[in-house]
DNA sequence: CTTCGTAAACTGGAATACAAGTATCGAAAT
DNA sequence: ATTTCGATACTTGTATTCCAGTTTACGAAG
């Protein structure tokens, strides 16, 4: 049986896909997509894990059709690699792709910061998100800060009237988030630092200094580089 | 029969899809995707054209399965809108989406210019593309200049070591290209002007002036705005 | 004549069945 | 013993079939 080997030791696929609950009343493909994406990002599906459409479909109790739709989107984002008539697998962590994702994020989000410096902020919409961030930062709870951070950046894109740009950022963000998840547990005080970054960016925006806001945003996004990427350099396919 | 009406008068779908030739020896879905995308961009499939999967599949002599894969990608890029259980149609021209696409292009490509100002250019790879541009510009042949322009921008992304970023730009570029196709025939000397823009950007890059290069690139990309978008403001769905 | 209800038919979504291609494993020959 | 050739089995890709939801059209009633 020419199944792709290199399954990371006694790794149980069923366990990794345990918590997949499908709401049959809603479109299935996006649900499968989100479930797989989340599991790839947080490491429950490590790089190199073979993705056999039949197996996954059976484990998730869905047919191959919606699964394939999800797989195609995943492949389009570079999260899985699929060789026709051979098989698919979770894409290996690739430094070049990671740096590209970082490039795209900084390019788009720094431009968003620049624009907001001209157009101004919607402080009313910002306040609740900031308060949640402050709370998470105070408790140094990076797991929830992770989610609130997402909210924050999305809100900025919405305020800049480019929600579609945020959609695009999300499609590459997975590669950044994979690294962030690796680093999450090891760093202390990381939430507080990120929160500080946010406040600095906002201050520059309020001051109307577009260049400064863009630079601070770039630095904030690239701060993930500070915590040694190389340490986690895993094996590539 | 609850088929989506509003077919643009006596518009023949079969004629618009006349030149679709499928190479059965290669994956079908990408071929269908490219064919439809091109026809939407160049106007052969006008905004609002209903896309009935059965009809299209029959006209292209393929099954619905690969067609649906193409449609999903098209929908993801916003080129077609699909209401579940109702039907799909070519997306209407949307000024907001167009401006967003422009925003993303300028954000990424100006950043590419900035980076190249630091890292330098690969003049050897650049030369042939430039010569083709000059030739097209001299003949004021905007149709072929259109293609060479594509090459140029892609080459810049490759030289900046972010080919994936270009892939992302392409996914939004369709919305910009739709406008460009509208304006193509009406403007004279447009190729020469665009070529001049390119030379200016390259000069700034060679001079190592990142800010200037970024600004020139932004101006070049946004030059499509000069030729009155509003003139072609079509009906929205 | 207008409005509401019902039914039919078309649509997209999912599941199943079929075809083509490749890598692996084994056997045979050198 | 090693290398090469062939068969087998598993994979993705494509086609076909089936199902459920929604909309529109038609008819009846007020």
Image (cartoon, coloured by chain):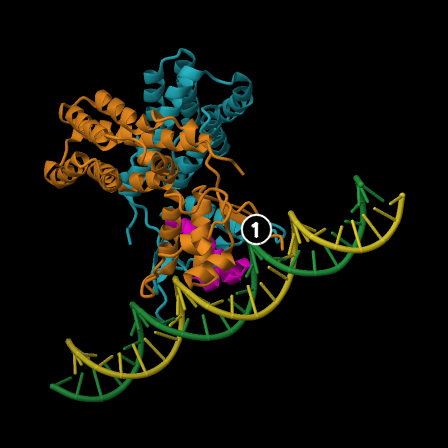
Chain colours: A orange, B cyan, C yellow, D green
Q: State the residue in front, B166 or B90.
A: B166
For this view, does B146 lie left or right of residue A149?
right
Above or below residue A187? Residue A14 is below
Would you say residue A106 sits in the magenta stretch?
no
Q: What residue lies at 11% left-to-right and 38% top-to-bottom?
A: A127
- Element at badge 1? loop
Relative to the observer, which residue lies in front, D12 or B235?
A: D12
Give the x, y percent position of residue A170. Answer: 33, 41
Q: Position of residue B70 (x, y in %)?
A: 46, 52
Q: Chain of mark 1?
A: B
In the rendered image, residue C2, in percent from the top left (x then y), is placed at 15, 76
Q: Is residue B68 visible?
A: no
Which residue occupies the foreground of this view, A143 or A218? A143
Magenta span: predominant SS is helix
Q: What segment is highlighted magenta in the picture?
A: B52-76
Q: Nearer the viewer, residue B181 or B174?
A: B174
**Callout 1: 10 Å neighbours few (<14), some, many (20+)?**
few
Q: Please name the residue that numbered disc 1 is placed on.
A: B27
Q: Quadrant of the C terminus of chain A?
A: top right
Image: D12 above or below B145: below
- The N terminus of chain A lies in quadrant: bottom right
Examine the structure image and report whether residue B56 is included in the region drawn in magenta: yes
Q: Residue furthest top?
A: B207
Q: Residue at x 57, y 47 (%)?
A: A5
* Residue in view at x 42 percent, y 21 percent: B198
Q: In this rendering, is residue A141 above or below A230?
A: below
A175 lies above or below B193: below
Q: Is residue B18 visible?
A: yes
Q: Residue at x 52, y 47 (%)?
A: A7
Horizontally, residue A227 falls left or right of residue B144, namely left
């Amino acid at each position: 049986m020419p199944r792709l080997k290199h399954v990371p030791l006694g790794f149980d696929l069923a366990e990794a896909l345990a918590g997949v609950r499908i709401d049959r009343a809603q479109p299935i493909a996006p649900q499968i997509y989100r479930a797989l994406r989340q599991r790839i990002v947080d490491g429950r599906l490590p790089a190199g894990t073979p993705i056999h459409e039949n197996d996954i479909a059976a484990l998730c109790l869905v047919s191959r059709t919606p699964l394939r739709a999800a797989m195609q989107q995943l492949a389009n984002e570079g999260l899985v690699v699929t060789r026709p008539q051979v098989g698919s697998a979770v894409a290996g962590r690739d430094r070049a792709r990671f740096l590209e994702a970082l490039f795209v994020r900084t390019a788009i989000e720094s431009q968003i910061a620049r624009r907001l410096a001209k157009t101004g902020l919607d402080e009313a919409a910002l306040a609740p998100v900031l308060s949640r961030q402050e709370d998470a930062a105070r408790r140094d709870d990076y797991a929830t800060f992770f989610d609130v951070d997402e909210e924050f950046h999305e809100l900025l894109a919405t305020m800049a009237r480019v929600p579609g740009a945020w959609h695009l950022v999300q499609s590459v963000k997975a590669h950044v988030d994979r690294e962030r998840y690796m680093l999450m547990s090891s760093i202390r005080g990381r939430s507080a630092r990120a929160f500080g970054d946010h406040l600095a960016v906002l201050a520059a925006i309020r001051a109307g200094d577009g260049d400064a806001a863009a630079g601070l945003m770039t630095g904030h996004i690239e701060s993930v580089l500070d915590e040694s990427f190389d340490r986690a350099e895993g094996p590539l396919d």
